[in-house]
């Protein structure tokens, strides 16, 4: 009796497996994704990276998959946690490529992890279209890693445009000449502050307060106190998520009310608007989107429906766009042959329709059209400055805190 | 004045982070590297009750503290006690407890990520300003400071003026001698460990009012707590509080007057200095 | 040299020689695990050189490793590449000497926490200087392949083994064993305990710095927050203790299973990696006290297996 049940189970299993193989006769595309699920960057990846990846895979499979020459192919996602550790990011990329034999890989999260994995992508011929690496070294990087494509934009341009926003406001006579400049002492903050200091000084601004604070600091009362004492017209902070919240919180507590209040990463998170409510109004930050664009609207709605949380108003859309680009390249070539897809991506005459608008890569595999500065207006983080994108909202001065 | 008050408020925060570890290390002899994760767990609990039911984090302590006590008591009883029994020397126990609690911290991060997701958590509670001597401070920080003071004083009184406290101190000074005078060392150690965990989780619940937390951030708090406990002297609540306040004021002073970029460096210099010139900590007794 | 030592030496050389052939067999997945393994093998073995006999648990590996990555990051464009590990070795030794001279009189847990703080302190200073000088994250774009890094590490491993073996035979090794057993006795028998400890700490510090210098090209992008990450120090300690520090080969016996296990867990449970790793640590602590060396010794005792 017992044995018979066992046999039956085994048979059922065998049939089940056969069923699976039969079903998978419909072609699938294996897509590998390794990004932080733990470690210091897990928080950011949980807002920006993973939900966007899952949404794209979900939507493609909903509509039956990507169109290949031989019919439609659904996406099978292979996920790994790189633990915010370059060592693990390298190993995960290797594993996906050579053990799981994935057809394509989602690029990792953050500049550092993207660059750690870049040699593997390049060596094995996987396109690496990144939506979360911001750097100013695109030419050098594209020369070293020809498989790397950049969607999010250049740090230099971001810093320049932030400065340009101030120049415009000053030339209109709305703000004065005094700027307080602070940054998180990390590769990102140091790079950004260096560029913006140069641009601001060249434009005749006076840096009345400048300082940095260590990574991970959330006790920023002294920084805000120092900035406030210098009585600036504009406050620019090249900050990371934890400190972005802490700086804003302290500014409210100490009634530090410059006419421009700018914090960098995480200002575009929906959690920022939720945390500060009406006080978020007028705060500026990195990135931005055109929230009235129907494509973005649809994306945001689907994002909430699938993930139970909204996208951030910057890199979420860029991450999603990297996959749209990959998908369109695959469909245009009708194959999952990476070499062919890579050729297509390298052909600079090709353009891709994404939720960011049309994207095209230049000779440095770089996208030249993107949002650079955004501002919270009526509960939405709108792009107010951009390169090559339409629909920038007019800039508002920051009114005092409530 | 601003520097002093901000420094004191920060010192209060640090005391909340470190007092629990002092009990755990001082009495139960467990160098608990999962301290930060327990803190974050307390913060998550406060966040959860606040967003789900608009329950104030301070009221939430009524639940957070007892639950944390029970959890930590169980951890000690079933996970760490065997290590204590097994260890032949104090050094062996230190190595084992460092490894075991490091593993525990990983496991806790894993559980929290699974339960709450990896994203950032914060909420606005008492984030209005309160003016003291002409400068503004966050109400939540002042409340946290007041409660830190309350906890420190209560602990000190309890340790120094009750029989149970006396037993704890006896174990802290010398477990072997304590056993000889009839103290149930394992029970007292479990009590101390549980109590330490409760204090840490309480600290986490209070800190979550003004800190942005995520599941992986605990290690930062563990580092701070270790430094403060070692600086203040193991097994002495006063030492921990004094070290926390000194560190808070010193960091604020450096941040405001010298350069915020050097705050952590300054903290480490201070810590390294204390270790070099007074290795037993500010209030520690010389090892015999 | 006794006949037994000669035999061990020859066996070790053959084993390393075989291991060094790996890149000829596979340059992909196996090599990337192999490189990670080789890196931890060097770090853990050199860590145990110091911590094994002295019983000092050092969490400073990340400080030295980070220092090494910085040396490469700053120098790879202007200096010949072979020079960088040498500079890193010197820098690591100098840092270790400084730290060692002032701290090795601390005992037990104080030393542990001090070394943990050291990595953070060095990182803070480095970022502050970078901030001051406006220098950003460093892009180490080189033509060095993983295969070359692997060979460098294997070479380094051989060097560490030889060093360990020489130390064990020397007066220094003898002195250290006495210190480990009882420092007071050591002092009374006229051993300069401080000097002995500092020398050994310098060896392990400079090796970690060299490893950092060698690995920088693999990371491509050097930022203090990752290259000084404290997790590395803990990994090294856990692997070394899992193996056991009583023997020169002990750490290796920890590194190999641990790296494989880490990879296995990362692969099988991408969403619970950390949880399972944590539980594994716990299991190791409870099931394998004294590491594999301890297990080996116990088995030997139980079965009376012989030779010596």
Image (cartoon, rainbow, N blue to C red):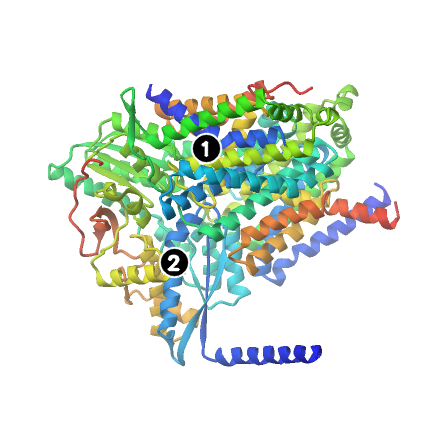
**Observer able to see residue B6:** yes
Answer left or right for A76 relative to C113. left
Q: Which element carries disc 1, helix, strand or loop? A: helix
Q: Quadrant of residue A257?
A: top left
Chain on which label 2 sits: A
* Quarter where residue C261 is shown: bottom right
Q: Is residue A70 left or right of residue B166?
A: left
* Marks 1/2: CA–CA distance: 33 Å
Q: Which mark, by number, is residue C221?
A: none
Left or right: residue A235 versus residue B254 is left
Residue at the (51%, 30%) spot, across then down: B18
| Label 1 and label 2 in one chain | no
Residue A51, label in figure = 2
The quarter of the image holding the C terminus of chain B is top right
Residue A151 seen by the camera: no
Local secondary structure at mark 2: helix
Which residue: 53% across, 80% down?
A: A19
Q: Position of residue A338 (x, y in %)?
A: 43, 69
Coordinates of residue B278 in the picture (x, y in percent):
58, 19
Q: Mark on residue C124? A: 1
Q: Which percent across, then down, holds residue A341?
A: 39, 69
- Locate residue C167 relative to residue B143 in the image: left or right: right
Q: Is residue A75 above or below residue C4?
A: below
């Amino acid at each position: 009796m017992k044995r018979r049940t066992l046999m039956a189970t085994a048979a059922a299993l065998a049939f089940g497996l056969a069923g699976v193989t039969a079903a998978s006769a419909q072609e699938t595309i294996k897509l590998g994704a390794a990004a932080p699920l733990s470690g210091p960057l897990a928080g950011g990846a949980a807002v920006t990276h993973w939900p966007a990846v899952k949404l794209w895979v979900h939507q493609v499979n909903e509509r039956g998959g990507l169109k290949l020459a031989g019919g439609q192919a659904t996406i099978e996602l292979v996920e790994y946690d790189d633990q915010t550790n370059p060592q693990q990011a390298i190993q995960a990329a290797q594993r996906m490529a050579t053990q799981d034999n994935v057809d394509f890989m989602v690029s990792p999260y953050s500049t550092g992890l993207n660059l750690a994995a870049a040699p593997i992508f390049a060596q094995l011929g996987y396109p690496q279209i990144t939506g979360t690496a911001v750097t100013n070294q695109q030419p050098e990087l594209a020369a070293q890693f020809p498989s790397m494509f950049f969607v999010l934009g250049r740090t230099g341009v971001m810093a320049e445009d932030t400065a340009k926003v101030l120049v415009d406001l000053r030339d209109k006579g709305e703000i004065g000449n005094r700027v307080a400049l602070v940054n998180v002492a990390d590769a990102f903050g140091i790079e950004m502050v260096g560029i913006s200091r140069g641009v601001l000084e060249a434009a005749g601004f006076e840096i009345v307060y400048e300082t940095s604070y260590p990574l991970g600091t959330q006790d920023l009362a002294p920084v805000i106190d120092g900035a406030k004492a210098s009585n600036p017209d504009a406050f620019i902070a090249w900050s990371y998520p934890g400190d972005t919240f802490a700086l804003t919180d302290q500014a409210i507590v100490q009634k530090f009310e410059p006419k421009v209040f700018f914090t960098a990463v995480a200002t575009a998170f929906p959690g920022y608007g939720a945390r500060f409510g009406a006080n978020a109004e007028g705060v500026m930050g990195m990135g931005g989107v055109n929230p009235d664009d129907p494509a973005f609207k649809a994306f945001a709605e689907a994002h909430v429906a699938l993930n139970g949380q909204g996208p951030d108003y910057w890199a979420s859309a860029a991450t999603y766009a990297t996959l749209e680009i990959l998908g369109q390249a695959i469909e245009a070539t009708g194959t999952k042959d990476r070499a062919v897809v890579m050729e297509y991506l390298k052909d600079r005459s090709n353009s891709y329709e994404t939720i960011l608008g049309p994207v095209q890569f230049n000779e440095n595999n770089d996208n030249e059209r993107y949002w650079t500065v955004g501002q919270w207006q009526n509960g939405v983080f709108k792009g107010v400055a951009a390169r090559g994108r339409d629909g920038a909202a007019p800039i508002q001065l920051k009114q005092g805190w409530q | 004045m601003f520097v002093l008050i901000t420094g004191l408020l920060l010192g209060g925060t640090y005391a909340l982070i470190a007092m629990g570890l002092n009990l755990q290390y001082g009495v139960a002899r467990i160098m608990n590297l999962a301290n930060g994760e327990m803190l974050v767990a307390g913060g998550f609990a406060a966040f959860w009750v606040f967003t789900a039911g608009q329950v104030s984090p301070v009221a939430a302590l009524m639940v957070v503290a007892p639950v944390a006590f029970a959890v930590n008591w169980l951890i000690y009883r079933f996970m760490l006690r065997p290590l204590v029994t097994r260890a032949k020397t104090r050094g062996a126990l230190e190595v084992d407890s460092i490894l075991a609690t490091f593993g525990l911290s990983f496991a806790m991060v894993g559980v929290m990520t699974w339960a709450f997701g990896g994203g950032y958590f914060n909420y606005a509670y008492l984030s209005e300003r309160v003016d003291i001597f002409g400068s503004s401070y966050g109400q939540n920080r002042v409340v946290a400071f007041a409660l830190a003071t309350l906890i420190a004083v209560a602990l000190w009184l309890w340790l120094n003026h009750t029989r149970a406290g006396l037993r704890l101190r006896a174990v802290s000074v010398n477990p072997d001698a304590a056993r000889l005078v009839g103290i149930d060392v394992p029970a007292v150690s479990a009590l101390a460990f549980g109590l330490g965990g409760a204090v840490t989780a309480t600290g986490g619940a209070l800190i979550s009012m003004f800190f942005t937390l995520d599941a992986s951030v605990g290690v930062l708090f563990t580092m701070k707590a270790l430094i403060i406990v070692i600086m203040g002297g193991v097994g002495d609540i006063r030492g921990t509080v004094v070290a926390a306040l000194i560190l808070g004021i010193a960091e604020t002073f450096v941040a405001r007057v010298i350069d915020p970029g050097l705050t952590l460096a300054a903290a480490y210099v201070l810590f390294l200095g204390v270790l070099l010139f007074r290795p037993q900590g500010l209030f520690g007794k010389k090892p015999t | 040299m006794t006949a037994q030592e000669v035999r061990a030496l020859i066996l070790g050389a053959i084993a390393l020689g075989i291991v060094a052939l790996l890149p000829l067999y596979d340059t992909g997945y196996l090599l990337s695990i192999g490189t990670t393994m080789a890196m931890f093998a060097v770090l853990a073995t050199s860590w145990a050189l110091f911590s094994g006999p002295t019983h000092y648990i050092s969490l400073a590996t990340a400080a030295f490793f980070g220092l090494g990555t910085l040396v490469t990051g700053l120098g790879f464009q202007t200096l010949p590449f072979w020079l960088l590990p040498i500079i890193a070795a010197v820098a690591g030794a100098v840092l270790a000497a400084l730290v060692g001279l002032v701290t090795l009189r601390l005992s037990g847990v104080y030393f542990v926490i001090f070394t943990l703080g050291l990595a953070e302190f060095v990182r803070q200073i480095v970022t502050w200087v970078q901030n001051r000088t406006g220098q950003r994250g460093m892009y180490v774009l080189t033509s060095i392949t993983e295969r070359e890094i692997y060979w460098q590490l294997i070479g380094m491993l051989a060097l560490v083994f030889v060093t360990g073996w020489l130390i064990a035979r020397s007066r220094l090794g003898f002195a250290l064993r006495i210190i480990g057993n009882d420092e007071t006795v050591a002092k009374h028998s006229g051993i300069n305990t401080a000097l002995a400890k500092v020398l050994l700490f310098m060896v392990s510090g400079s090796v970690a710095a060299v490893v950092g210098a060698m690995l920088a090209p693999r990371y491509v992008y050097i930022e203090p927050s990752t290259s000084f990450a404290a997790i590395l120090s803990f990994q090294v300690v856990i692997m070394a203790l899992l193996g056991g520090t009583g023997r020169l080969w002990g750490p290796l016996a920890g590194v190999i299973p641990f790296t494989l296990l880490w990879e296995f867990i990362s692969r099988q449970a991408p969403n619970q990696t950390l949880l399972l790793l944590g539980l594994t640590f716990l299991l190791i602590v409870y099931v394998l006290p004294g590491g594999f060396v301890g297990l080996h010794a116990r088995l030997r005792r139980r079965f009376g297996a012989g030779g010596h």
